[in-house]
Image (tube, grey):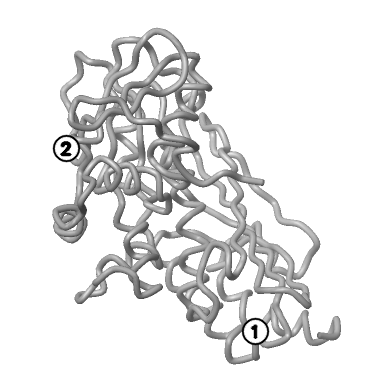
Amino acid sequence: MSGLDEFGEIARLFRPLTRGAAGALDLADDAAVIVPRPGCDLVVTKDALVEGVHFLPGEAPDMVARKLLRVNLSDLAAKAAEPFACFLAVAWPAAYTPADRERFAQGLASDLETFDLSLMGGDTVATPGPLTLSLTALGWVPHGGMVRRAGARPGDLLAVSGTIGDATLGLAALRGEVDDPEGALALRYRLPLPRLDLRHVLSAAHAAADVSDGLVADARHIAHASGVRLRLDLDRLPLSRAAATWLERQADAAAALLRLASGGDDYEVVCALAPDRPKPAGLTIVGEVLEGEGIEVTAAGHPLEPGAGGWRHG
C-alpha cells in the first residue's frame, strides 16, 4: 500500500489501541516514550508468528491477533512481570483484505483491553509471503525481581501450572486426527491463556519458563541455564478430562504421555520451588531438581528417551 494509505490505516485501526497512553504520541512519531516506574525494572520480550508455522492457514484474523498478544504475555507471566505496553509489527500478505486487517485490529483491541495494555508503536508493511507478525511486550517487576530460567537448585521441586498437552491435541483435532466434540482442545491451541494470575506465586520461585516449546524442552532450558539436572515424572502430568480420555485410548501410554509433554503451545509455566514452601494452588509437582546436568524423563517408573522434547528453533 502507499505511504499515505499506510498512515491512514494506522490512524484508523491502531491509534485507538493506544488507549490514551501519552507515551504512544498518538502513533504519529517514529518512536515512543516510556517513563520509568520508580523501584521497578523493565522486562521486555518479543515473539513472532508466521502463518502456516505457528497457526493454521486461514485462521480468523481476530484470533491470530489475540494469540500473538497472548504468547508474548505468557513470557512476561513466567518472569513474574506486570504487562503494561506492547509494540506491533505486521507484514500483510496481498490476500489480506482491508476487512481482514480491520478484524485483526478488533481482535487485538479486545485483548489489549482484557489484559490492560496499550499499543505504543510499531510498523506495517506488505509481503509476498504468508502473514508474518511480531509483537514486543513490556512489563514491570520490582527491582531485581525478575524470575529467570537460571536459579533452580538441587533439592527444589519442579512444578507446572494448569494442564499439559491440550494444545498438542487441539492442533491434531484441527487437522482431523483427534476427536474434539466440544472444541475445547482446539481452543487451547488457537487461544492460549497467559498465566498472569500466577505473578505473585512465581515471585517466590527460584526459576521459571513458559511452556511454549513443550514441557520437556522448556524444563531442559531451566536445567541448562541453572546448571542442574531435572527429573520429570510423566505419570504426574496434570491432564484435562479430554486429554485423559485420549490417553486411555492409546496403546503405548508412555509414548502418548511423552507426546503430550513435548508438543508445545500450552503456554503454562514450569518452575522450580523450594521444597519447604507450601505448594501454591494451581501448580502440580511433576519432578525434582538434582545435582548434575540435563533432564531425565520417566513414565511408569522407567526412563524414556525424550529426544528434543519439543519445538526446536532453526
Q: Residues within 10 Å of mark 2 (few under 14, many from 20)?
A: few
Q: Mark 1: which amino acid?
A: Arg
For disc 2, the marked residue is 281
Q: Left or right: 127 with respect to 155?
A: right
Q: Residue at (60%, 39%) from the top-left corner? A: 36
Q: Is residue 155 above or below residue 116?
A: above
Tell me where residue 109 appears, x and y as whole percent. Answer: 49, 73
Comparing 109 with 60, the one in front is 60
Q: Is residue 100 above or below residue 36?
A: below
Q: Which mark is residue 254?
A: none
For disc 1, the marked residue is 12
Q: Residue at (32%, 24%) from the top-left corner? A: 204
Badge 2 vs badge 1, beta-carbon distance below 8 Å = no
Comparing 162 with 206, the one in front is 162
Q: Mark 2: which amino acid?
A: Ala
Tell me which label, 2 or 1, sits earlier in the chain.
Answer: 1
